[in-house]
Image (tube, rainbow, N blue to C red):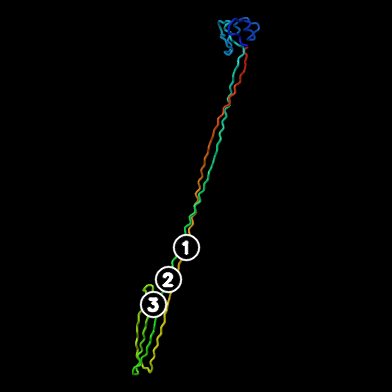
């Protein structure tokens, strides 16, 4: 228990406070730690008033800190695919027709005059050609000979010729293209926590 801070104070009270049952002189209590209190000198003149409020016991506070740090990371990855397909078709068709027509007529006439025979043959040719278009021409040829009869003969024939050609060509092309995109995102969070603990300890000087 601390000594009083005013009034009358005796050497025996000082002795009881500082565990000295039979003090002889105040100089026995020189140089206490600052925590004892009062105005007690380390040497020289000393009086009972220097012990006002002094106490043999004092409290010491210890503070202990515990820092704690937490780091949390969040990693997120996104992958996106874009498939693209192109199909291109080329169709080409060719049709070519060649039409050719030809008609040929043969006419032969036998004429008998005075024992002489004149043979006349007429040729008539007509037709169609894609390059020349429609055409027709006629020719004749005469010969003489001996005959006793008149004979007339006509021969006619027509020839038609058609040519058709069709060409078809198909080309198909398919192109496939895939694009991939990856996005990575990382979030980091750090939490710091400090814990402080204070301990009071009572210590006696003497």
Q: CA distance from mark 1 to mark 2?
A: 21 Å
* Numbered disc 1: secondary structure: strand
Residue marked by disc 2 = 97
**Which image quarter: residue 96?**
bottom left
Compare residues 172 and 25 and report the one nearer the observer: 172
* Numbered disc 2: secondary structure: strand
Compare residues 23 and 122 and report the one nearer the observer: 122
**Percent of width and height locating residue 170:** 47, 62
- Image point 54% across, 34% down: which residue? 189
Q: Which comes before the other along the chain, label 2 or label 3?
A: 2
- Image point 52% across, 46% down: which residue? 80
Q: Which comes before the other along the chain, label 1 or label 3?
A: 3
Question: In the displayed structure, would residue 161 be above or below residue 187?
Answer: below
Q: Is residue 90 left or right of residue 17?
A: left
Disc 2 residue crowd, few under 14, some 14–19, many 20+, Cα 10 Å = few
Circle on res. 127? 3
Disc 3 residue crowd, few under 14, some 14–19, many 20+, Cα 10 Å = some
Query: The C terminus is located in which quarter?
Result: top right
Foreground label between 1 and 3: 3
**Percent of width and height locating residue 166:** 45, 68
Residue marked by disc 1 = 170
Q: Is residue 48 left or right of residue 181?
A: right
């Amino acid at each position: 228990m601390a000594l009083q801070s005013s009034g009358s104070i005796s050497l025996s009270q000082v002795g009881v406070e500082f565990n000295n049952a039979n003090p002889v002189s105040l100089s026995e209590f020189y140089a206490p730690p600052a925590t004892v209190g009062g105005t007690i000198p380390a040497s020289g003149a000393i009086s009972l008033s220097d012990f006002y409020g002094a106490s043999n016991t004092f409290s010491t506070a210890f503070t202990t800190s515990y820092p704690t740090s937490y780091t949390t990371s969040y990693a997120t990855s996104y992958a996106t695919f874009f498939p693209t397909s192109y199909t291109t078709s080329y169709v080409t068709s060719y049709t070519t027709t060649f039409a050719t027509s030809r008609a040929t007529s043969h006419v032969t006439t036998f004429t008998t005059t005075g024992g002489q025979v004149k043979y006349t043959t007429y040729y008539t040719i007509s037709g169609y050609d894609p390059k020349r278009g429609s055409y027709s021409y006629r020719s004749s040829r005469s010969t003489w000979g001996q005959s006793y009869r008149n004979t007339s003969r006509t021969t006619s024939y027509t020839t038609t010729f058609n040519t058709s050609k069709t060409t078809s060509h198909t080309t198909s092309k398919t192109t496939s293209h895939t694009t991939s995109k990856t996005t990575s995102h990382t979030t980091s969070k750090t939490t710091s926590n400090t814990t402080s603990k204070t301990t009071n300890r009572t210590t006696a000087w003497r």
